[in-house]
Amino acid sequence: MLRNLILGCLVIIGLVACNSDNTSGNDGNSATTAGSTAYQGGPGSVVGPPMIPPQNDVTQRLMKDYWVFEFYVVPGDRAASRAGQGRWYKFNADGTFESGRWEDEVWGSGNWYFRTESGKNYLKLDSEVDAEDSEWEIQGITDGAMSWGGTQTYDNAGIILKALSLMTVPTREQFGFQE
């Protein structure tokens, strides 16, 4: 009970601090230039308006169809690894996304950001559900699949996954999961 009270007070203090007067008109957490690859923010609510992603081969692939986690590996945690399978994302051209798991679970939405840094491609997912915020290094790309590795940004380093491109939301039956 005391823990919840302290947590509630911290949330209120955080909200008050976030709503302090800002005379510059720039909140410092969002870029407003269309196509910009810079982004800021961290764990918390969706940061500002979505940004139009840069136009390149990788973002064009991301915006095509649904991206479904065929393999999801959390080192030392079989239950979490299995729970990640069937997860899907639909990336939209306006910088937003929808997400879910299998055909019957819609989890939420948010903004997605793409950047290239030192020759590496990064995908940041800023979800309405704070626990779902993540950043991934896109490490391998073929016509219908990608491999992603988690980064330190949201403490998902070490997690690796293989995502497949599907035209529709995935079903358990497609992947041999009969529950």
Image: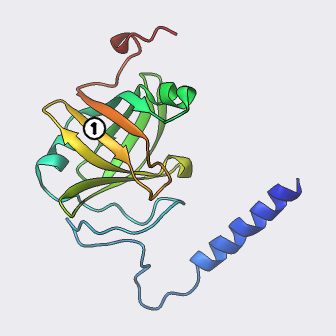
Image: 93 above or below 36:
above
Q: Which residue is mark 1?
A: 147
Q: Which residue corresponds to the image point at 22% horizontal and 56% vertical from the top-left? A: 120
Amino acid type of the residue that numbered disc 1 sits on in the rendered structure: Ser
Image: 158 above or below 37:
above
Q: Which residue corresponds to the image point at 70% horizontal and 74% vertical from the top-left? A: 13
Q: Nearer the viewer, residue 74 or 11?
A: 74
Task: Examine the image and state in which quarter residue 175 appears.
Answer: top left
Q: Residue furthest right?
A: 1
Question: Relative to 83, is 145 on the left or the right?
Answer: left
Q: Return the x and y of residue 36 as percentages of the image width and height.
A: 22, 68
Q: Which residue corresponds to the image point at 13% horizontal and 32% vertical from the top-left? A: 143
What sort of colour scheme is used for the picture? Answer: rainbow
Q: From where the camera sits, is residue 177 visible? A: yes
Count of numbered badges drawn on the protein: 1
Q: Nearer the viewer, residue 95 or 81?
A: 81
Question: Relative to 46, is 169 on the left or the right?
Answer: left
Q: From where the camera sits, is residue 63 visible? A: no
Q: Which residue corresponds to the image point at 52% horizontal and 60% vertical from the top-left? A: 43
Q: Return the x and y of residue 7 as percentages of the image width and height.
A: 76, 61
For mark 1, give the secondary structure. strand
Q: Residue furthest front?
A: 76
Q: Return the x and y of residue 177 as percentages of the image width and height.
A: 44, 12
Question: Relative to 32, is 98 on the left or the right?
Answer: right
Q: Return the x and y of residue 118 as percentages of the image width and height.
A: 21, 64
Query: How many other residues sit within 10 Å of disc 1, few (<14), some (14-19) or many (≥20)?
Result: some
